[in-house]
Amino acid sequence: MSSRWEGIDEFVAVAESGQFTAAAERLGVSSSHISRQIARLEDRLQTRLLYRSTRKVTLSEAGQTFLQHCQRLQDGREEALRAIGDLTSEPKGLLRMTCAVAYGERFIVPLVTRFMTLYPQLRVDIELSNRTLDLVHEGMDLAIRLGRLQDSRLIASRLAARRMYVCASPAYLERYGRPHSLSELVRHNCLIGSSDIWTLQQDGREHGLRVQGNWRCNSGQAVLDAALQGIGLCQLPDYYVLEHLKTGSLVSLLEAQQPPNTAVWALYPQQRHLSPKVRKLVDYLREGLARLPEYRAG
């Protein structure tokens, strides 16, 4: 019994090239072999796929439909072969990635450096930038991004939770009082980091609230230090403040208005199959972040 796969590669090669001779060269076989395989395929299907003339080959209506399915079969077959091969493949070659500056310096770069010691054939180019780079245009394999995602052209994989807190020191609250609603924030000195828009929620809906204050710095660590010194209120991610909330050096405020959990994401260009270097690094980052004290504290 003939294999149900026989003739499919030959048919696709002829359909895509438009000639038996070109298809034969593409597959490294003779034109007569191509002709025999397609004739057998048509015989099995009991339908004509191609119309042959002295100048060119055209597809029948059935051939056009069959071609689309065969191309998907070929793609799936190659995908399966690559996936199996990657199970034993080690990361190698160049991996280009990007991450926000402060988060990258504190969390991502140390993990990537340790990952490289496991795979000496890997080369890494990390661009720390607070700009949102276009991965496809910049030729990047991977981006680590925080918060909510905007670019639907990218595939996202969640690495860790990220919860935002509004906090203040006990000294600040003793002097200026504690806010109990979003409207009361306008009466407080808010420490402004990279943005003066704080994301909060009210009645189940998110609000972007513009805050004001006499202090600004685009560094999360600097915002934290100012909050600990009692200068004002801050809104920071969990990994900055959880230990200080446990010790009481900071107090969590407006807990009912905390925004829904955001996350730390690994993003990569859309493709069905990830290379070993990207797939294994993403897994390593997810496991590594979960072991860090800043995340275990939550």
Image (cartoon, grey):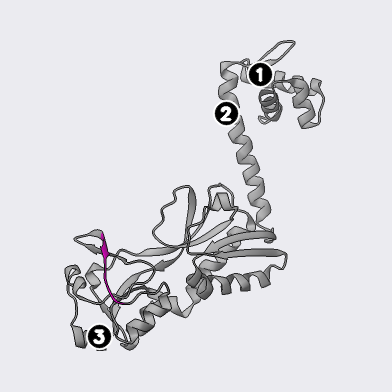
Asked if residue 113 is positioned above or below residue 84 in the image, the reply reads below
Give the x, y percent position of residue 262.
37, 63
Tell me which numbered mark, 2 or 3, is placed earlier along the sequence.
Answer: 2
Q: Start and end of the magenta stretch?
A: 207-214
Q: Is 212 a magenta residue?
A: yes
Label 3 residue SS: helix
Q: Quadrant of residue 74?
A: top right
Name the residue carrying label 2: 68
Q: Is residue 250 left or right of residue 71?
A: left
Three-letter amino acid code at the position of disc 2: Gln
Q: Is 87 a magenta residue?
A: no
Q: Is residue 261 left or right of residue 146?
A: left
- Label 3 vs label 1, nearer the camera: 3
Give the x, y percent position of residue 84.
65, 51
Residue placed most toward the observer, 180 or 34: 180
Give the x, y percent position of residue 49.
63, 18
Q: Distance between the residues labelled 3 and 1?
A: 82 Å
Q: In which quarter of the image is residue 87?
A: bottom right
Residue occupying the point 66% across, 26% down: 16
Name the residue carrying label 3: 172
Residue at the far front: name it.
214
Three-letter amino acid code at the position of disc 1: Glu
Mark 1, Cα crowd under 10 Å, few <14 / some 14-19 / many 20+, is some
Residue at the far top: name it.
54
